[in-house]
Amino acid sequence: MTASNRLFRWRDPYDLAGTEALFAAAMAENAAFQRENCPDYARILQLRGFDAARLAAGDLAALPPIPTLYFKHHVLLSMPERKLLVKATSSGTSGAMSRIGFDVGSLARGARMVLRMTRYHQLLSPRPCHYLILGYQPRRENQTAFSKTGYGFTFFAPALSRTYALVWRDGSYRLELEGLRDRLLRCGRGSAPVRTIGFPAYTYLLLRRMEEEGVRLRLPKGSMVTMGGGWKQFEGRKVEKRELYRLAWEVLGIPEENCVEFFGAVEHPILYTTCRSHHFHVPVYSRVIIRDPDTLEPAPDGTPGLVNLLTPMAASMPILSVMTDDLGILHRAEECPCGIASPWLEILGRVGARDIVTCAAGAADFLKGGGGA
């Protein structure tokens, strides 16, 4: 069994201490595969003077990260496209989209991760519920990752109904919060729990509108508010999480402990789920390096910097180390009272593309002249 497969079968999803050697072996294994099967990625590693021995010895920072911005303009594949069973894109709010694909082995590892994480955080339930998806109604033409993950979330418990915020009407998506409000009013008179999943911006807009209308519900026990993704074009209306928790309780009767948030990226398909203290602890399937924005050297714990995400999950593409446009802080496990024994990531916000300087910049210039799709 490969090191990557053994890692994604690990019983404790937060046992970072017990998986340090295995994670380094899985990353070295994945890097060797990508270098052998993706010529453009091999050129990136060569340009950056990558030393495979350092990675095998556990020096994860030695692996050159590729910025998510790069994937919005280049497609790097390590196997024929016909082997990609699932394809997804980023939201494309900046005008360009990352295009990512996964083969059967990568999907199997991802499925084991999702099952382990949802069990750990008690998100799986045999009790049927109504789903409100504050995101896109699925369409074959819509390949965005969120449309796929939002629909996938509705299998954590049997679905009695699915109601979407972004509905396809007359050739475009339209935001229809009224339909969600009406569904919630009907659910409030029933006995089945309700689960919401979606962008925090739409969650806030819906709950705030209902509060202004004087709506006060007490949804059935077991109902949950779950959120994922950023505020994107609603950045100017962003509110503190505490305000969202207050609205969930005041409007829907859902307590704070039933408010859960997810973090991830289409270029880094790892499920980060908040603990009971609302922190994103790093699971065994990934590691996080915070890099100094000026030097790109690893920054000490507790220091803000650019978020570099690592995982050996995918064989189909070289997304084993990506540099996001997020600013974040990596905190020690002891700084969270929940008891999970792994560090946790605090996302501070995003930086503009012009402000991101990455160690793959030279490779980007190279590929513009001779490689990449």
Image: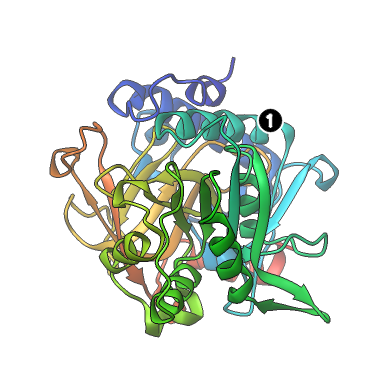
Amino acid at the residue labelled 1: Gly
Spot the residue most to the front.
Answer: 189
Q: Is residue 99 visible?
A: no
Residue 70 place in picture, x, y as percent: 57, 66
Mark 1 Cα-neighbour bin, 10 Å: few <14, some 14–19, many ≥20: some
- Where disc 1 sits, the SS reads helix
Nearer to me, 367 or 189: 189
Q: Residue at x 62, y 34 (%)?
A: 33
Q: Quadrant of the C terminus?
A: bottom right
Residue 263 place in picture, x, y as percent: 44, 53
Q: Is residue 2 visible?
A: yes
Seen in the image, is 339 located left or right of residue 5? left
Q: How many marks?
A: 1
Nearer to me, 46 or 125: 125
Residue 190 place in picture, x, y as percent: 56, 49
* Quarter holding residue 98: bottom right
* Quarter holding residue 92: bottom right
Q: Residue at x 43, y 40 (%)?
A: 51
In the picture shown, does residue 194 fall above or below 30? below
Nearer to me, 93 or 174: 174
Residue under numbered circle 1: 105
Q: Quadrant of the N terminus?
A: top right
Spot the residue most to the bottom.
Answer: 236
Query: By what rule are the colours in the image chosen?
Result: rainbow
In the picture shown, does residue 230 fall above or below 218? below
In the picture shown, does residue 272 fall above or below 297? above
Q: Residue at x 48, y 40 (%)?
A: 311
Residue 205 place in picture, x, y as percent: 46, 76
Nearer to me, 307 or 356: 307
